[in-house]
Image (tube, rainbow, N blue to C red):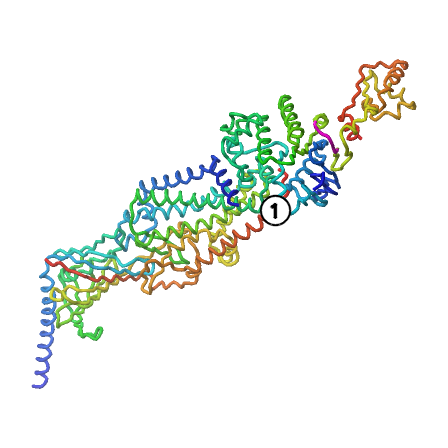
Amino acid sequence: MWTLLGIELFKISKRPRTYISFAAICAIVLIFQFAFKADGENYMNLMLQGINDSFQLNKLNAMNGYFMCYIILNTLLVQVPILVALVAGDAISGEANMGTLRLILSKPISRQELLIAKFLSSMIYTVILLIWMAICALGLSLIIFGSGDMLVFRVAGEVSQIMQITSDDILWRYLAAFGYAAIALTVIAALAIFFSLFAENSIGPIITTICIVLVFTIVSNMNIPIIDEYVKPYLFTSYLVGWKGFFYIATNQEGIPIRGSVEDIQAIQKSISILLAHIGAILLISIYIFRKKDILS
Amino acid sequence: MGQNIVEVEGLSKSYKSFQAVKNISFQIERGSVYGFLGQNGAGKSTTMRMLLSLIQPTAGKINIFGKPLQGNEKDILKNIGAIIEKPETYGYLSGYDNLRIFSRIFKLPTYKKDLDVLLEKVGLKGRGNDKVKSYSQGMKQRMGIAIALLNDPEFIILDEPTNGLDPQGISDIRNLISHFSKNEGKTILISSHLLNEIEMVADNMIILHKGEKIVEGKVNQLLDPAKTIVQIDTADLNQTLNYIRNTQWEKLLISENELLFEMNKSNIPALIKYLIEKDIEVLNIKSKHSLENYFLKLTNH
Amino acid sequence: MKYLISLLVFLLVETNLKSQDINKLINQVKSKLEKINRYEANGTMKTTIAYLKIPIAKVKVYFKKPNEISIQSNSGVTFIPKGVNAISLQNIFSNDFTVIDGGRETVKQKVLRVIKLLPNSSNSNIVLSTVYINETDLVVEKSSTTTKEEGTYEMEMQYGKYIQYGLPDKLIFTFNAKDYKIPKGLTLDFDNSSRKNEKVNTAMLNKGKAEIVFQQYKIN
């Protein structure tokens, strides 16, 4: 099992496409940082419409590295599933296409172990991708924009809110958020591997996974009561943004944020459970199918 | 385990309404070279894949090394080396890396010197650092063989190993097979649609056609010299056929599209004499005693 | 008749005395405040408004005669209510105004003198100020200022060590803020159920409160 995992990681590390994702993330982050450095005040003004009339606020201080990272993650975590699908969608189908699937499966290995190794390697790849994202989006942003308290803009129900988290209370939230994102993206990886079982080239599973993520995400973001109630809870994409839950700080009765708290830890736990259940279910079905599958490629 | 390394009984494989392999049984003796003959789609690859547990049989039993394949896949595959169709390897990896990957699966040493020995054996000395995608088809084939031999297997399965190779490559593979069989005592299962290929290397053979076993036996027994296929080219095929009708020769005719007779070699002069007497212009006469004729006869029917 | 004259005289004297009384009171409070040329104070500011969840900020309050006041924070991001100038009592008293006696009212078990200040100039941003003065200590304990542009501010002051300067230890400042709405679709939020059924109290939505606790004054 560990040998297979090592082999899978070795193969991933040797494929040029693996590094496209790292380059893409770096490029997107740099573009964001450049844009915000050049014209971030306009964004702040947009987000602070109405606030400017009632409060004095040093907007440039608010636009610090922590805030930048949040903005970047907000956008990037919609794109990263594509990058994860790019590698995970290739896991089985890419080997089928190359003809190496029959080669490796004619060796004394169990299919179950191979699939789990491929799944784990995709997961490790996802985690490394997230670490890279943390380095670029958080580390680099802190260097460029500096540190400070972080503002979180949120629309909760019908209420718009601004939450301020003190700088000494942020880092653990990012750690938790990246951890959550790793679980969320692992669902995408599992889904891409699942689709890759049925194809003999990697384009199909990659496109299918991306389409599902996009369609589900669009539906997840619709604000229609009937969809809210009957559709959203069943779409895994509704839980992909759960990492933000770590930035929804709880407040005391007076509305003052409580350091080290999150507003609804149960909602996050529920989301994590749902995502883990998705991973487990997809993985089990995939193993069942893969074990029965005739390798015709 | 006995003399047989492989024992297959009543093996079938169906895909919905299509039956790829129909109730095939055969045994492969230890140390022999066993040939699978058949045109494309005859069921050779499907059968070989079933032996490697790549495809699940719909029915039948496979015993390898005296153990049922089902449930003992890992154990059995430890002692098998295989090339199925084109021996694709990881093109983006070097020759060494490809060998290392599979060495690790077999828990074998991955030192360069060990891998060099293997590369030299298959004629890829000095190319270990190059990416496999830069190899020629013949070199890829050799790399595939190197991977198949990595674990020093008792039983080697080679599915169309000479496909796409130049004459030199084909000759090299033949020599390798004969080396492994004669010098190293390996049991080899080889398939081909190029029938002289099998004729040259195999001791026993099976002919598959549309998923069915048509013939099984020792190659030298199947090549009965008394039964020769004679092909005659004449200027006018229909005229020739008219003269042959209702004669003793008609019974020997096995194809009317081209004049093909199955007869004892000793009867050839009499047939030619008859044709000349009838004033038929004979352009060419070919007689074949090879397995190819045999196969041709069976599969054309 | 004698009786009636006596009553009239009494009433006239009383009213006059009253007017003199509140002017004197205002002047006493004012002169107490005027002793301060400048001050600098460290403090904490707790701002609460429905749409803001912000921590208690460490602030520095600077004042310079006659009525310049500013609140600054070193912590980087601090929301300072714009009407904060109104927290300077000097600002209220700096205008020329007409004094109207509002009698006495008991606020938090203290009897305070209620005085309404009507600016004489029509250009003033302040429309009406009501101050509640503690006549014993000569300090304003509560005030309400209605402005033309920023609505009504209310202040409550609690005094301690710096009572002789008329500077509070704690100040609660209530203000009106504009509505806040983030443009839809910008935030892609995580819907946790806790917020789903939250009823929006629109009346309270724009009412803000800043509570400043002064820890240390450096005066003059």
Q: Which residues are magenta?
A: B201-206
Q: Is residue B202 magenta?
A: yes
Above or below for C68 versus A200: below
Residue depicted at 66% across the width and 44% down the height: B69
Question: Residue B218: horizontal and vertical position, in percent?
Answer: 76, 31
Residue depicted at 91% across the width and 23% down the height: B248
Above or below for B255 versus C160: above
Count the marks.
Answer: 1
Question: Residue C105: horizontal and vertical position, in percent?
Answer: 20, 74
- The reply, left or right, for residue C188 in relation to residue B141 is left
The disc numbered 1 marks a residue on which chain?
Answer: A
The residue at which mark 1 appears reads as A291
- The reply, left or right, for residue B68 in relation to residue A271 is right
**Quadrant where the image shows the N terminus of chain C:** bottom left
Identify the image quadrant of residue B107.
top right
Q: Nearer the viewer, residue B41 or B125?
A: B125
Identify the image quadrant of residue B258.
top right
- The reply, left or right, for residue C95 in relation to residue B88 is left
Question: Residue B28: horizontal and vertical position, in percent?
Answer: 71, 36
Q: Nearer the viewer, residue B279 or B182?
A: B182
Identify the image quadrant of residue A204.
top right
Q: Nearer the viewer, residue A119 or C50?
A: A119
Above or below for A70 versus A257: above
Q: Amino acid at mark 1?
A: Arg
Q: Is residue A246 magenta?
A: no
Residue depicted at 39% across the width and 39% down the height: A26
* Mark 1: secondary structure: helix
